[in-house]
Image: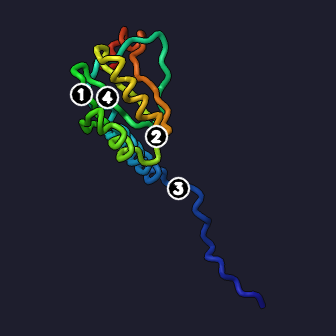
């Protein structure tokens, strides 16, 4: 004689989506807050104009050249003499340098950065504002 373990009740076939909706909202809030915490380049310079620009990858080392001759590596001021050491200290596993040069910066400043980057085997990219960004008012001031 076989044993019957059934309870005689129908199985529950519907479920509440309220908990799933709560999870989606929490994830949305998390990603919105996390994306606003990502800092763009914090030092303000007047970048030169270019007809077209390409977004720079995230694995870059930021070097800023100010119009008065000051140099910054990742927002830390340095001198030309200490530039290679500052790049080495801030490099980590990055393989490229993004140069944020003010319109008034000199070619000799850019050459110093390019030379130090080349000595460390780093690629050099120069940051610019596109004409479309400036027309829309979204470029770096």
Q: Tell me which numbered mark, 1 or 3, is placed earlier along the sequence.
A: 3
| Image quarter (top left, top right, bottom left or bottom right) of the C terminus | top left
- Disc 3/disc 2 C-alpha distance (Å): 59 Å
Q: Is residue 30 visible?
A: no
Crowd rating for badge 4 (residues with CA inside 10 Å; few <14, some 14–19, many 20+) = many
Question: Does residue 120 appear in the picture of this structure?
Answer: yes
State the CA–CA distance, disc 4 to disc 3: 56 Å
Q: On residue 120, which mark appears?
A: 2
Q: Secondary structure at mark 2?
A: loop
Q: Position of residue 118 (x, y in %)?
A: 47, 34
Question: Mark 4 sits on what residue?
Answer: 64
Between the residue at mark 4 and the residue at mark 1, the CA separation in whole angstroms equals 8 Å
The tag earlier along the polypeptide, 4 or 1, is 4
Cβ–Cβ under 8 Å for marks 2 and 4 = no
Report the residue marked by disc 3.
15
* Distance from the alpha carbon under mark 2 to that under mark 1: 21 Å
Say which residue label 1 marks: 70
Residue 98 at x, y percent in the picture: 41, 30
**Alpha carbon separation for disc pair 2 and 4:** 18 Å
């Amino acid at each position: 004689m076989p044993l019957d373990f059934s309870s005689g009740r129908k199985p529950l076939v519907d479920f509440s989506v309220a908990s799933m909706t709560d999870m989606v909202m929490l994830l949305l809030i998390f990603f919105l807050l996390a994306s606003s915490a990502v800092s763009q380049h914090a030092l303000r310079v007047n970048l030169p104009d270019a007809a077209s620009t390409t977004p720079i990858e995230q694995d870059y080392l930021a070097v800023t050249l100010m119009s008065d001759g000051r140099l910054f590596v990742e927002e830390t001021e340095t001198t030309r003499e200490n530039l290679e050491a500052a790049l080495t200290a801030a490099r980590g596993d990055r393989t490229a340098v993004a140069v944020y040069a003010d319109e008034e910066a000199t070619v000799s400043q850019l050459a110093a950065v390019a030379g130090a980057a080349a000595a460390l085997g780093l690629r050099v990219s120069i940051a610019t504002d596109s004409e479309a960004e400036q027309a829309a008012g979204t470029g770096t001031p």
